[in-house]
Image (spheres, grey):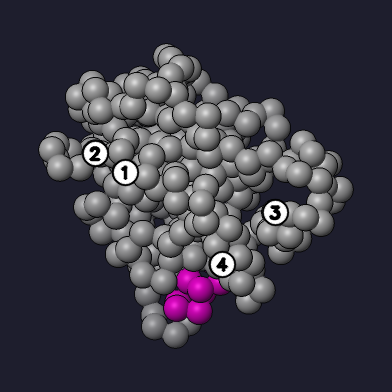
């Protein structure tokens, strides 16, 4: 999966569609969820910081502050990750959907910004639209086959009667369609001017920002709820009865969601570039 170093074909079985209409329903199996901590550890880490940054900064810390290179890498990784709680749950859901969108686009190449690298505060969610992907099959030539994918993602890992991830995802998706996606693209371009966004370049962003200078592109919007499997049936009762022509509603049921995302983040905290684990 582009710069994340993940073979997207390996994730194809993770997201089987149980239903397609009036909403997409995906039920992740226990078997697949149980391997995510190992299978996605490095890719998850790279959603927050690149290997190049991690290596260079760890070497600087090792020289300046003492400690082993391994210890310095672990300190940097932990400084980028959210604390346990709602932000960790939300980040996990967003990154999972980054994988999901790429899987569903396969064998086309879908790539996008890793917005979690751009956080100014690890204890808060990344700003603007949640998950973006670009599909540009003839780049650097823009064509009517170019696609922009945009997902608003909400997660629910524990019982909370007041929190309705499906309703919140639909509301957020509406904001994306009305104006937030446009603001997100401009914000990303501003960030790209002063820092490296990986394989997302300013020209890619301008292709969609300056839409009148290019053939009309396809935009696909998704309202996504990532829900613990034992909570999903109650949440499905809240789904609108009519299918929308403006967006696709996607429900992803993950067994033991809280335990799964906790295990994934613990694995990320303990990983490093030295082939072992931090102490």
> Disc 2 and disc 1: Cα gap in Å?
6 Å
Residue 153: image quadrant is top left
Is 105 contained in the magenta span?
A: no
Magenta part mainly helix, strand or loop?
helix
Dot placed on the residue nearer the N-terminal end, 4 or 2: 2
Residue 23: image quadrant is top left
Is 59 contained in the magenta span?
A: yes
- Give x and y (percent) for residue 165: 29, 39
Q: Is residue 268 or residue 250 the one in the foreground?
A: 250
| x 17%, y 38%: residue | 158
Q: Mark 2: few, some, or many residues within 10 Å (few <14, many ≥20)? A: some
Q: Quadrant of the N terminus?
A: top right
- Give x and y (percent) for residue 169: 37, 41
Q: Secondary structure at mark 2?
A: loop
Q: Secondary structure at mark 4?
A: helix
Residue range in magenta is 55-62
Q: Which mark is residue 164?
A: 2
Dot placed on the residue nearer the N-terminal end, 3 or 2: 2
Q: Is residue 122 left or right of residue 199?
A: left
| x 25%, y 28%: residue | 238
Q: Which mark is residue 133?
A: none
Q: Is residue 176 or residue 31 the one in the foreground?
A: 176
- Give x and y (percent) for residue 245: 53, 29
Asked whether the residues under the numbered discs 2 and 1 touch, taking CB atoms below 8 Å apart as contact, a structural biologist would say yes
> Disc 4 and disc 1: Cα gap in Å?
23 Å
Dot placed on the residue nearer the N-terminal end, 4 or 3: 4
Residue under label 1, please give it: 168
Residue 140 appears anywhere in the view:
yes
Residue 157: image quadrant is top left
Residue under label 4, please give it: 187
Q: Is residue 82 left or right of residue 190?
A: left
Q: Is residue 188 left or right of residue 90?
A: right
């Amino acid at each position: 999966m582009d710069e994340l170093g993940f073979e997207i074909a390996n994730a194809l079985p993770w997201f089987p569609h149980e239903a397609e209409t009036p909403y997409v329903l995906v039920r992740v199996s226990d078997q697949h969820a149980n391997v995510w901590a190992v299978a996605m550890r490095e890719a998850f880490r790279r959603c927050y910081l690149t290997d190049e940054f991690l290596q260079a900064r760890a070497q600087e810390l090792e020289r300046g502050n003492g400690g082993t290179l391994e210890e310095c890498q672990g300190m940097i990784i932990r400084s980028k990750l959210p604390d346990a709680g709602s932000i960790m749950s939300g980040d996990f859901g967003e990154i999972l959907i980054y994988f999901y969108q790429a899987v569903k686009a396969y064998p086309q190449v879908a790539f996008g910004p890793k917005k979690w690298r751009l956080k100014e505060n690890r204890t808060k969610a990344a700003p603007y639209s949640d998950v973006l992907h670009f599909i540009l099959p003839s780049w650097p030539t823009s064509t009517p086959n170019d696609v922009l994918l945009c997902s608003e993602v909400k997660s629910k890992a524990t019982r909370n009667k007041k929190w309705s991830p499906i309703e919140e995802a639909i509301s957020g998706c509406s904001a994306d369609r009305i104006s937030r996606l446009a603001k997100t693209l401009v914000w990303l371009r501003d960030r790209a001017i002063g820092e490296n966004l990986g394989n997302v370049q300013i020209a890619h962003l301008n292709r969609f920002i300056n839409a009148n200078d290019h053939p009309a592109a396809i935009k696909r919007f998704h309202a996504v709820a990532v829900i613990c499997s034992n909570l999903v049936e109650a949440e499905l009762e809240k789904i609108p009865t009519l299918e929308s022509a403006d967006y696709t509603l996607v429900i992803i049921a993950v067994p033991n969601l809280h335990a799964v995302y906790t295990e994934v983040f613990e694995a990320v905290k303990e990983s490093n570039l030295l082939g072992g684990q931090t102490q």
